[in-house]
Image: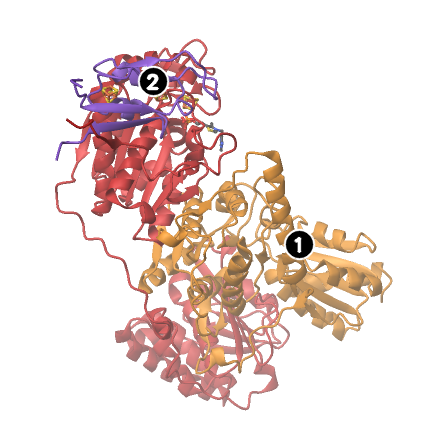
Chain colours: A purple, B red, C orange
Amino acid sequence: MAERQDRGRVEINLDECKGCQLCITVCPVNCLEVTTKLNKQGYLPVDYKGSGCTGCGLCYYACPEPGAITVFRLKKSA
Amino acid sequence: MSAPVYEPYLRKPKTFYEQYERKSGDPTVTHYCPGCGHGELHKMIAEAIEDLEIADRTVFISPVGCSVFAYYYFDTGNVQAAHGRAPAVGTGVQRARPHSIVISYQGDGDLAAIGLNEILQAANRGEHMAVFFVNNAIYGMTGGQMAPTTLPGMHTTTSPGGRDPRKAGNPLRLCELISQLDAPVYVARGALSGPKHILRTRKLVRKALQAQVERRGFTFVEVLSACPTGWGMNPPDAHKWILEKMAEFFPLEVFVDKTDSEPEPFEIPEEPPAEKLHELLRISTAGQVTFSPSQPVEPKYANPRIKVAGFGGQGVLLLGLGLAQCGMMEGRKVSWLPSYGPEMRGGTAHCHVNVSDHEIGSPLISRPTVVVAMNQPSLEKFEPQLVEGGLLIVNTSMVPKEPSRSDLDVLKIPASDMAKELGNPRAANMIILGAYAAYTGMIGKETALASLNTLIKRKHLVDLNRKAIELGWEFGTKARG
Amino acid sequence: MAEQIYQPIPPDDPRYEGKTPLLVKGNEAIVKGAILAGCRCFFGYPITPASEIAETAARDFPAVGGTFLQAESETASINMLYGAAAAGVRAMTASSGPGISLMQEGLSYLAGAELPCVIADIMRGGPGLGNIAPEQGDYNQVVKIGGHGNYRNPVYAPSSGQEMCDLTMRAFETAFEYRTPVFVIADGFTGQMMEPVVFPDPLPKPPEPDWACRADAETRENLISSIFLEPDDLEEHNRKLQEKYRRIEENEALYQVFHVDDAKIVAVAFGIVSRVVRSAVELAREKGIPVGLVRPVTLWPFPKKTLEALAKQAERFVVFELSNGQMLEDVRLAIHDSRPVDFHGRMGGNVPSTEECLDVIERVAREGGVL
Ligand SMILES: Cc1ncc(C[n+]2csc(CCOP(=O)(O)OP(=O)(O)O)c2C)c(N)n1
Ligand code: SF4
Ligand code: SF4
Ligand code: SF4
């Protein structure tokens, strides 16, 4: 598989997200998007598009919910 | 080539509880509105507490405002304070537990309106605490009323036509105010908007807490923060408004940074052993001499109720104290009450002294058995109050007039003149003490002399007062006949 | 347990061993007593006639490794007290009427959060700025509660220098036993007066409270707060508080009585006034008037059962106060208005003389046909 390796990845806990979209406003590579299914709080949560994340962490700090976003970084190969 | 491995880089800080059990409703999400700045700042603080490994000794003071429930989230010690009083509460915690790391977290109504005095004074004292000040230019919790930080022209429910600075004043700039004080070691303003300022604010927060770990003193970080609900904006627009409008009025600067200089020494005082307390409180009576009651006392002089009166500078209160001190040293019950309140006017003073073999009821004396009149007005005022046949001691140096009653037992003594001869007119009081002691037999001479050790604080004066008592004693003995 | 007669520490108690009396002001005795009871934090703002408490504290607390802090206001003092109490440390403040008024918000929070601490109120004349002379006009705001909500606080009313020390020590024990703010309330005279005081040995060091925020791992999970958002939760909290207050009422009421056994007239007075009235009662007895005195030592809980029992034998009551009759209402409630209650109150800083009180007793006896 010759897939290009993203430097980062985010996981969004869709039920903790309040759909404020602040993460989207700060993401430098535009890899987050609003989903179309209401979560259990009644918001339209944001989710990762699935590729392109650099692991910069900006979305994490812009997000007001403690556990909504987890940012991962690519492990440097041993 | 193996599949890429990703490891968590930024996750929910451990300083947050895993589940918010104190909160009703969903225990996984905060109570804050979507896009609220409180949540962003919470995260930065929680992350710093975790990284600095101080959660165990952190006490987080939550205010009254939307962040009143900060204790739902922070896995630290939590104390909830009254509106505006968090800096005072934090002061109490910090002084009581000097090893603690105190965080005072406050909104703009809480800190800049109702609690302005508390924050300024805590800052000025340089209390060891980190204050995080959420400036969202509005009262969030109560539904969007005007705050001290509301921008001119801004519409709120209590400034429906826009804030009019001519009537409501201009917004208060707290960082600028606090940076006028000498004590704060770190004062900075950040904004929770846009990548640059969000990351910068994170640094300010860490610095303020790092300074607490280093025991540097008072640190203050103001954060321009979105209240999308109160502002009636969607969160992205609210974030834009912070940089476009608020930052114009509230410059994003570091106003004070003394975190590189040597901190003041921070000492945690030691608790002395219990056996030393009496000595440290100056109430140790080890080695104190006591005397047996002077005997016998003629019935008419026993259990005296004494009023001593004169000008302020005549040592009237001290004479009364001496009488009480001597009585106490001889094992009797005593009380001493100074003139006080409405009676204490015009430079005159008097006191009530009871010396008794029985429990003392009223310490107030309305019908004295003894009156010491050090000056003319005292004679006029208190002679009539004396019981029939009571003892009137008159300082004839200052009282030219004769007593008007004929039933009294009068001891006339030119105490002020005698004291002048001794070298200090202020010793008249102790001359009278000696004369009273000898004349009535109520106080032993040894007791009177020994009482000086307690009465006279300035040791070089003890000798003079000794002589005064001796002189008075001689006079009293002669007068007694 | 029931209402109890207040017993001073007997002179031969081992706590007094090797100690002789010292002549000290009541205000100083409060500070020394507090420290002997383990108090290590003082926060206060100066006000006559309580200032000697802060002044003495400024010397004594640092001397024993404690904290003295002059606060910017009584609002701040009471909140500093809240913080120190939340941290589980024995702490106190002191003030007088105007300052106590400012503390009411904090007192309600202390009660709501169940924080133990001691507040000394050396009363002065009011209302408003009034004057600095002795009064008992803070009875309502202290005993009947001046803050918001369903709370009470124990109130000790010393009447001598020795009691200023002893009851302050006791106040700390009560505060920590029940987790409640406790008042020591006296008039300006009792604060300013000097009497012999024997200072006992310090109380044994109490264990660290497990409910406090002591800034350590063991207590990290603790929360000090008075918020209960849900009506049911707040009601339950309030019920818990009322149950605590019931226990305090049952166990902590203290009083003294003089010549009440055969009394047809019962005088009631507290603090300094109780001493004046006691002298008057002695004189009245010499004149053959069957009068006795009840002196509440705690104003809340009020010794109401004692008064209620006396109403069976006594024909009249007469209340003496340095106020417009604030305790008077509690006396009338205690005896269910089953007997006439006369009142003699002085205000503005005037304290009745023994003779004045005797006159009142004689008049009450005459009018009541007791003579
Ligand atoms: C003594 C008192 N007065 C008024 C209130 C009502 N009150 C609660 S929160 C608040 C204002 C909060 O605004 P702010 O401090 O800006 O915090 P925010 O909610 O915006 O975070 C007010 C006035 C109160 N709780 N106590
Ligand atoms: S970590 Fe950076 S790049 Fe990745 S989603 Fe978040 S903001 Fe975008
Ligand atoms: S910032 Fe957080 S809460 Fe807001 S949309 Fe993004 S993930 Fe959801
Ligand atoms: S009202 Fe404003 S400050 Fe309060 S939670 Fe909502 S957004 Fe935040």
Tell me the number on the disc at residue C246: 1
- Which is more toward the observer, C287 or B272? B272
Query: Picture coordinates of residue B41 (x, y %)?
Result: 32, 29
Can residue C63 be seen here? The reply is: yes
Relative vertical location of residue C101 with respect to residue B108 in this rendering, above or below: below
Element under label 2? strand
Residue B239 lies left or right of residue C189; in this view the side is: left
User: Residue at 41% of width from left, 61% of height from top?
Assistant: B312
Q: Is residue A70 above or below residue C265?
A: above
Question: Residue C23: x, y in percent?
Answer: 45, 72
Front residue of B82/B100: it is B100
Percent across and percent down for residue B244 are 26, 12
Q: Position of residue B401 (x, y in %)?
A: 49, 67
- The residue to which callout 2 is attached is A47
Figure quadrant, ligand 3 = top left
- Specify whether residue B396 is in view: no
